[in-house]
Image (cartoon, helix red, strand yellow):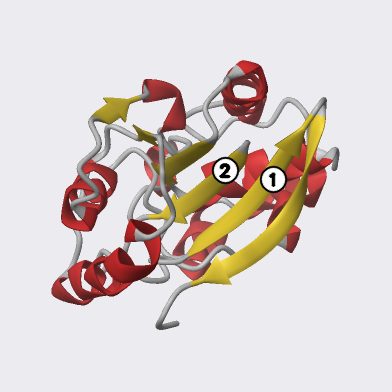
Amino acid sequence: MRLILLRHGRTGFSGRYVGSSDVPLSEDGREQILDLRPNLGTMKIDAMLVSPMLRCTESARLLDLGLPMQLDPDLREIDFGRWEGKTFAEIEAQDPDLVQDWASGAVDFCFPDGEATAGFASRMDAVKNRLLASDVQTMLLVAHGGVIRSLICGLLGLSQKDCLLFQVAKGHYSTIDLYDGGGVLTGFNLGSRC
């Protein structure tokens, strides 16, 4: 199976933590996705799984690939709780001890008033297992940066602590070829604009 992992286009909230906030694409983000149509349109994609968040469903519609959009709630980004919509500097000023816990990779970390990282990892593990069990030849996932980083690590056999080693660009896609039990990263941050 070939897996194409597309991060939604820009939203106009650059530099802010946007997980559970349901925001649309910016005009620039729509243009990013439209620029991808020629490339993705030639890839013979058999199925498309999409996060139900507006920025992802809008990205999938703009691609106009002629495929049904299968919404998967497990593809939602992590809920940053009270950190939603804030910059890292704002978060660090408000919750310096919690930022330290998060940065240290504490397994029991939970975003304040948001989602636990263990719960998010469990969701991503379920997605990974469904992908590995699928008989689809080429699948497109339209999702979020955290989801894509987590799936890359899971499918390559890396620790989830390595997720932040991958800077997944908005409006770009990565490819993984899946084999029995794992995968090979064959492309990263592909697209026409950064």
On the image, numbered disc 1 is attached to which residue? Answer: 177
**Classed neighbour count for the residue bearing mark 2: other residues with Cα under 10 Å, few (<14), some (14–19), many (≥20):** many
Q: What residue lies at 23% left-to-right and 31% top-to-bottom?
A: 68
Q: What residue lies at 60% left-to-right and 30% top-to-bottom?
A: 110
Earlier residue among tags 1 and 2 = 2
Q: Quadrant of the N terminus?
A: top right
Q: Secondary structure at mark 2?
A: strand
Q: Position of residue 190 (x, y in %)?
A: 53, 71
What residue type is disc 2 on? Leu
In this rendered view, identify the residue nearer to me: 125 or 107: 125
**Does residue 7 lie above or below 191 as drawn?**
above
In this rendered view, identify the residue nearer to me: 114 or 118: 118
Q: What residue lies at 66% left-to-right and 49% top-to-bottom?
A: 176
Q: CA distance from mark 1 to mark 2?
A: 6 Å
In this rendered view, identify the residue nearer to me: 118 or 67: 67
On the image, numbered disc 2 is attached to which residue? Answer: 3
Q: Position of residue 70 (x, y in %)?
A: 30, 26
Q: What residue lies at 45% left-to-right and 74% top-to-bottom?
A: 191
Q: Position of residue 4 (x, y in %)?
A: 52, 49
The reply to whether residue 105 is in sight is: no
Q: Are the residues flagged by discs 1 and 2 in contact, CB closer than 8 Å? A: yes
- Which picture quadrant has residue 3? top right
What residue type is disc 1 on? Asp
